[in-house]
Image (spheres, rainbow, N blue to C red):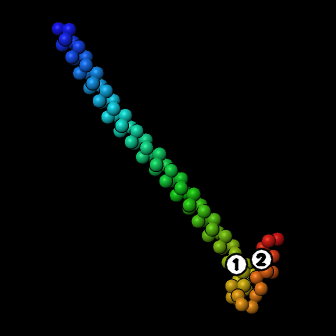
């Protein structure tokens, strides 16, 4: 009888360890994928913001008469006054 109790205790202990290992592996995998998804979403939003800022800068400079004049008459215009104007 004591051997049977000892064997049953060992069996249930091994069974509990296996079940807990499988469940913890599943939980760790899910949290890893969730963290990766959050990181990718953060980088996506950062890139979208950066591209939107660049688009707004292009729209701002595209209506500047100095920039338009320089782009249309590149050979005739000296770039130094244009750069000096934007440095101010």
Q: Quadrant of residue 56?
A: bottom right
Which marked residue is nearer to the observer: mark 1 or mark 2? 2
Apparent side of residue 57 relative to residue 19 in the rendered image (left or right): right
Badge 2 marks a residue whose secondary structure is helix
In the image, farthest residue toward the top: 1
Whole-percent x and y of residue 63?
Answer: 70, 78
Which sits in the foreground, 60 or 32?
32
User: Mark 1 vs mark 2: which is more N-terminal?
Assistant: 1
In the image, farthest residue toward the bottom: 76
Residue at 25% x, 19% y: name it.
10
Q: What residue is pinned by disc 2?
A: 83
Which sits in the foreground, 19 or 58?
19
Whole-percent x and y of residue 77?
Answer: 76, 88
Q: What residue is pinned by disc 1?
A: 63
- Distance, label 1 to label 2, CA atoms, is 16 Å
Quadrant assignment for the C terminus: bottom right
Q: Residues within 10 Å of mark 1 (few under 14, many from 20)?
A: few
Apparent side of residue 21 relative to residue 70 in the rendered image (left or right): left
Residue at 39% x, 42% y: name it.
30
Q: Quadrant of residue 48?
A: bottom right
The image shows residue 79, relative to residue 31, as above or below, that is below
Residue at 59% x, 61% y: name it.
49
Which sits in the foreground, 45 or 74?
74
């Amino acid at each position: 009888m004591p051997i049977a109790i000892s064997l049953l205790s060992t069996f249930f202990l091994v069974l509990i360890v296996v079940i807990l290992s499988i469940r913890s592996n599943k939980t760790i995998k899910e949290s890893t994928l969730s963290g990766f998804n959050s990181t990718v979403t953060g980088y996506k939003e950062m890139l979208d913001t950066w591209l939107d800022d660049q688009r707004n800068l292009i729209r701002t400079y595209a209506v500047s008469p100095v920039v338009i004049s320089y782009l249309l008459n590149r050979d005739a215009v000296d770039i130094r006054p244009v750069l000096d104007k934007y440095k101010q």
